Structures are given as structure tokens and as C-alpha cells.
Image (cartoon, rainbow, N blue to C red):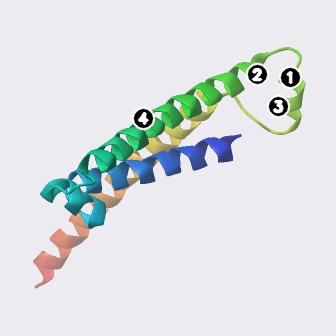
Amino acid sequence: MNNVVSRVDSTVADLDSVITGIKEGRGILGEMLANGSPFDSTFREAVSNIEKTTADARLAASRLAENMEALKHNWLFKSYFENRGYWDKAEYEDDINSKIKELDEKIKVIDAKMQELKGLEKGTK
């Protein structure tokens, strides 16, 4: 399900970039909309429909993720997810945040060492 949600998110992001390009006048459709054409209203309607579909897909992906999270905690399905190695989203996010914090601290130590090395290098020249 995570793969499905990530693919839907990726598709939605791709559609967003296409729509943005069209609105900015890039590409054939964007040029037609920017310069006007006999098909102007048709293209505007198509873009409007794509925007609506994108918004609907984003909402559906969000709801699917919520439903999957709820199923993980349902007594009937809980053992299924536990046996497959799924974890609680909050625990996963906490774990990632702690690892990010740890990486940030290590980056600060590395930056301090780099500054120290630069200082030593300037002192020897």
C-alpha cells in the first residue's frame, strides 16, 4: 500500500508540474492558451479537469493512507500487519526524526573539524 500511495503522490506531483508548465505558457498547450486559439475554451476546460483530477487523486491518496493506518490498529487486521513487519507511522516518524537529529549533530562536529583544519592550514602557510 505504501508503494501505491507513493506512486499516486509521484503521479500527482508530475501532473502538478505539467499543469504549472501549461499555465506558464510552456509547451504546445501552454502556448495555445497564452496566445489564444479557437480551441482555447476546450483546452482551458481540459486543464481545469486535470487540476480537479489531481486534487481528487491527492485527497484519495491521503484517505487511503489514513484507512491503512486505521487498519493497522484494528484487532482483526493488526496481526496481519505485525507479521508483515509494518510499523506505526508515529514510531517510524519519531525514529527518522531522531536519526536526522543525530546526523545534524555529526554534521556540526564535522564542520567544526573542517574549520579547525582550515585554521591549521592557514597557520602553516
Mark 4 or mark 1, earlier in chain: 4
**Which residue has dot 1 on it?**
77
**Which residue has dot 4 on it?**
52
Q: Residue at x 57, y 45 (%)?
A: 8
Residue with the most extreme top position = 75
Identified by mark 2, the residue type is Leu
Circle 3 packing at 10 Å, graded few (<14), some (14-19), many (20+), is some
**Which residue has dot 3 on it?**
81
Q: Residue at x 89, y 25 (%)?
A: 79
The reply to whether discs 4 and 2 touch (Cβ–Cβ < 8 Å) is no
For numbered disc 3, what is the local secondary structure?
helix
Mark 4 or mark 2, earlier in chain: 4
Q: Position of residue 95 (x, y in %)?
A: 58, 36
Snapshot quadrant of residue 80 = top right
Mark 3 to mark 4 CA distance (whole Å): 33 Å
For numbered disc 4, what is the local secondary structure?
helix
Left or right, 23 with reference to 82: left
**Which residue has dot 2 on it?**
71
The reply to whether discs 1 and 2 touch (Cβ–Cβ < 8 Å) is yes
Identified by mark 1, the residue type is Phe
Q: Position of residue 87 (x, y in %)?
A: 72, 32
Q: Is residue 25 above or below residue 3?
A: below
The reply to whether discs 1 and 3 touch (Cβ–Cβ < 8 Å) is yes
Most foreground residue, 121 or 55: 55
The reply to whether discs 2 and 3 touch (Cβ–Cβ < 8 Å) is yes
Q: Which mark is residue 91?
A: none
For numbered disc 2, what is the local secondary structure?
helix
Most foreground residue, 115 or 14: 14
Point out the frontmost of discs 2 and 3. 2
Identified by mark 4, the residue type is Lys
Identified by mark 3, the residue type is Phe
Point out the frontmost of discs 4 and 2. 4
